[in-house]
Amino acid sequence: MSARAAKIKRLNDQDSPDEVQSLTETVGANTSGSTNAIIAAKGALATTAAGNLDTAITDNTNKRNAAVASTGVMHRNTELTATAYNNLAGVMEIENPNDPDNWRAKGFKLTQTDVTDLPLPGQVTNGSVTNGDFLGTADLHHEPVPTAKNYTHRVTKGNPSDDAGYIAVTSPKTQYTKSNATIDVPADYLNVPLFWKSTAYNTAGAGPESAPYGGGRING
């Protein structure tokens, strides 16, 4: 079965340069100051691309740069700006999933797409943990789960068989879209044996939680 769901409408280099420039400038301005570093970075890139396209449009209109039309500068800048917009749109859909009101408030145009109902994802397997590149961080690795959209993780410094002792990972995020993630470990969980559990999610819900894995120490 399938249902209709909101999605951010993508742009392309065949769209009106004025529309591409205006939309990208708007969403760039509304996201470049985001507290989410990934969104902010893509928003800043979108703002820069929109500014370059604005210059190309102005030059072409005022005929100050006779080479603009003949060399394809306008088309190239439209393509680059549409790409920057689309990259930002993709990040928004990942970092703020299923939030069309938020997307619309940021200036994105929305469309509807068919979403096929998915079965619950399977269990996370083959989990492992290593020290991260920075003190106090852990790198989690596990097998990708087919149909999973994101993952959550829990950790305990107690008995791995006591489920009540696990706490949810909340830093730097509560959900992770890849089968590897870098976790900020709480200070009072450093330098002691840690066990982890991971769960895959999609639009149908949560799959079965993994068996405990890990058992090593994370350096502080």
Image (cartoon, helix red, strand yellow):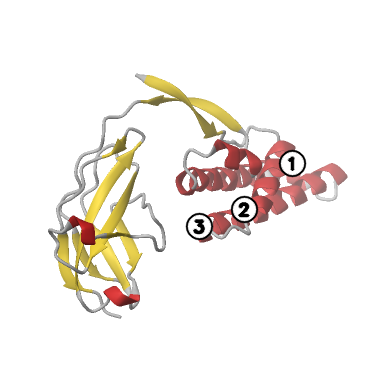
Please name the amino acid that badge 1 sits on.
Ala
Is mark 2 in CB contact (under 8 Å) with mark 1? no
Per the rendering, the mark at residue 69 is 1
Kindly tell me whether residue 79 is visible in this rendering.
yes
Q: Residue at x 36, y 34 (%)?
A: 203
Residue under label 3: 38
Please name the amino acid that badge 3 sits on.
Ile
- Observer-side mark, 2 or 1, equals 2
Kindly tell me whether residue 133 is visible in this rendering.
no
Residue under label 2: 31
Q: Is residue 142 left or right of residue 93?
A: left
Q: Earlier in the sequence, mark 3 or mark 1?
A: 3
Q: Residue at x 29, y 68 (%)?
A: 138
Q: Secondary structure at mark 1?
A: helix
Q: Residue 139: x and y, percent?
A: 28, 65
Real-space Cα distance between discs 2 and 1? 31 Å
Q: The C terminus is located in which quarter?
A: bottom left
Q: Is 189 or 62 nearer to us in this picture?
A: 189
Please name the amino acid that badge 2 sits on.
Thr
- Crowdedness of circle 3 by 10 Å Cα count: few (<14), some, many (20+)? some
Q: Earlier in the sequence, mark 2 or mark 1?
A: 2
Q: Residue 14: x and y, percent?
A: 63, 32
